Structures are given as C-alpha cells and as structure tokens.
Image (cartoon, rainbow, N blue to C red):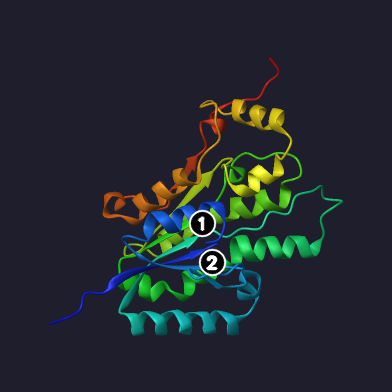
C-alpha cells in the first residue's frame, strides 16, 4: 500500500503578524515549513539577505528542504514569499546598504526561491504567492526603496506566471495597512493618527492579518485554478480613493 504524501508549503516571514496568520490558517491542510530570523518550535532560521547573495546558500537550502520532504513523505506544493524589509526615509537618509538589503529580501530571494524549486513545483502543479503591497501601485513620501521593491515583485509575479505556466500558478497579494504588532507599535500613544489612518480607508478600518491568510488559502486551493499572473489588492478600498482636500 502506497503512503499518501502531504503537501508542503514554504513560508518566509513566518514569525510576523501576517506570517503567523498564514501559518495558522494553512497548518491543518498543509505541512507549513516556516522560516524567519526569529525561531521557535514551528519556525526555522533563514537569512534571506544571505540567501539572495549566495548560490552556495541557495543550494544548501534546496538540499535541506528536498531531503526533509523525502524523509517525511512531503511534496513541495507552494512557496509563499511573505518576508519583507521596510527601510523608510528620504533619499538623503537612506544609503546603498539599505537599498541592497531591501532588494535582496523583497525581490531577489523570492526570485531564487521560485527558481530553485521550479521542478518540484511543476511536478506537483504547485503555487507561488508573493506578498507584495499597495505601495507597488500607489505610494507616499519616504517609501521609495520599499515601494520600488514591491513594484518589482509585482512585475516578477507576472513574468513568473508566464515562465512557469502551465504547471505552476503565480499570484501576488497587495495588502494595505494591516493590524499587526509592528503597526500597533508604530502608533503607540498616537491614537488620533491611527484613527485617521482607519478613516482614509473607505471601509473605515484597517485590515486584519486573517484577511491576507484567507486569500492565501484560496489561492493555494483548486478553487482558484484559473487565476495566475494576478496582483490582487486587499486594501479596504484605499487604492480607489483620491485624497484631495475637502
């Protein structure tokens, strides 16, 4: 009797607010292989900045994952590129190191994770989901490095959808502000500013990490098998609104 394999999903940025929600939503149906700079009983260490710059690191990661899947009867089915670095500031304040880290983590790492596991994903008719941002389409002051990396990630999504078709689907999710611990920390003792941020959104609230996790689950499922190359905003309507003076 042949033992049925379990689908494995690689999730970067698994320790953050959105990553934790994705992990929790997927763990019942998938073996979630979570990675981050913070480790615990569920999450392993992975430095995506180093991964992006080193072919040796990429090969080591590939071998570790494929060996783990072979040992545990897992099939590599999905990659969720959720990890990101956000360096904010004016062009005068930011430097070359800030730029290189941003591009390495937000763009280069997703590219090479997709590249090295292309064969496995093709065999499993798998799915790649890139967590981009509304900043890929509409940004604001001091977000130049971050917005550029997310716009490029959305472009990469479209290109990979073509290159990896017809066996692998590739989509991106573009979140607006999400109620994570990181966002709450940024608005500590700034309740008025947080309320203004909520009011900017036509739905009069900011998003919850579950809003992203639920869409990730859908895009991994057969219910979305005719969706590829899409960049899907989850933004409470904010991209539809002009912020002209009243």
Image: 6 above or below 62: above
Q: Is residue 20 left or right of residue 29?
A: right
Q: Which residue is mark 1?
A: 19
Q: Residue at x 57, y 42 (%)?
A: 179
Q: How many marks?
A: 2
Q: Residue at x 79, y 48 (%)?
A: 89
Residue 244 place in picture, x, y as percent: 68, 21
Looking at the image, the residue that sits furthest to the left is 1
Query: Mark 2: which secondary structure?
Result: helix
- Which residue: 57% across, 60% down? 83
Q: Residue furthest top?
A: 246
Q: Quadrant of residue 108?
A: bottom right
Q: Nearer the viewer, residue 85 or 45?
A: 45
Using the image, tell me which numbered label, if any, was put on residue 179. Answer: none
The N terminus appears in which quarter of the rendering?
bottom left
Residue 236's place in the image compared with 216, above or below, is: above
Density class for disc 1 (Cα within 10 Å; few <14, some 14-19, many ≥20) is: many
Question: Left or right: where does residue 23 sit relative to residue 238?
Answer: left
Quadrant holding the C terminus: top right
Q: Which residue is mark 2?
A: 111
Rendered position, 216 above or below 135: below
Q: Residue 54, image x and y in percent?
A: 63, 80
Residue 155 vs 78, above or below: the answer is above
Give how far apart the Cα atoms at labels 1 and 2 are. Answer: 19 Å
Look at the numbered disc 1 and give the secondary structure of its residue.
Answer: helix
In the image, residue 212 lies at what x, y percent? 46, 47
Quarter assignment of residue 211: top left
């Amino acid at each position: 009797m042949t033992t049925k394999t379990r689908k494995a999903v690689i999730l970067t940025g698994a320790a953050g607010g959105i990553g934790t929600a994705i992990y929790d939503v997927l763990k019942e149906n998938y073996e979630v292989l979570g990675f981050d700079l913070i480790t615990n009983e569920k999450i392993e260490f992975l430095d995506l900045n180093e991964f992006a710059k080193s072919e040796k690191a990429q090969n080591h990661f590939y071998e570790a994952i494929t060996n783990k899947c072979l040992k545990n009867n897992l099939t590599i089915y999905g990659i969720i590129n959720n990890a990101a670095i956000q360096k904010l500031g004016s062009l005068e304040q930011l430097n070359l190191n800030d730029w290189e880290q941003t591009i390495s983590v937000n763009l280069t790492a997703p590219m090479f994770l997709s590249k090295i596991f292309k064969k496995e994903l093709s065999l499993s008719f798998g799915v790649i989901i890139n967590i981009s941002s509304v900043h890929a389409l509409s940004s604001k002051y001091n977000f130049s490095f971050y917005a550029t990396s997310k716009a490029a990630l959305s472009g990469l999504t479209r290109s990979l959808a073509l290159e990896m078709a017809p066996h692998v689907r590739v989509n991106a999710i573009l979140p607006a502000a999400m109620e994570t611990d990181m966002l709450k920390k940024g608005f500590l003792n700034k309740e008025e500013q947080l309320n203004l941020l909520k009011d900017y959104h036509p739905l009069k609230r900011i998003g919850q990490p579950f809003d992203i996790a639920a869409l990730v689950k859908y895009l991994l499922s057969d219910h979305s098998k005719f969706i590829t190359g899409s960049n899907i905003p989850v933004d409470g309507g904010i991209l539809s609104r002009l912020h002209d003076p009243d």
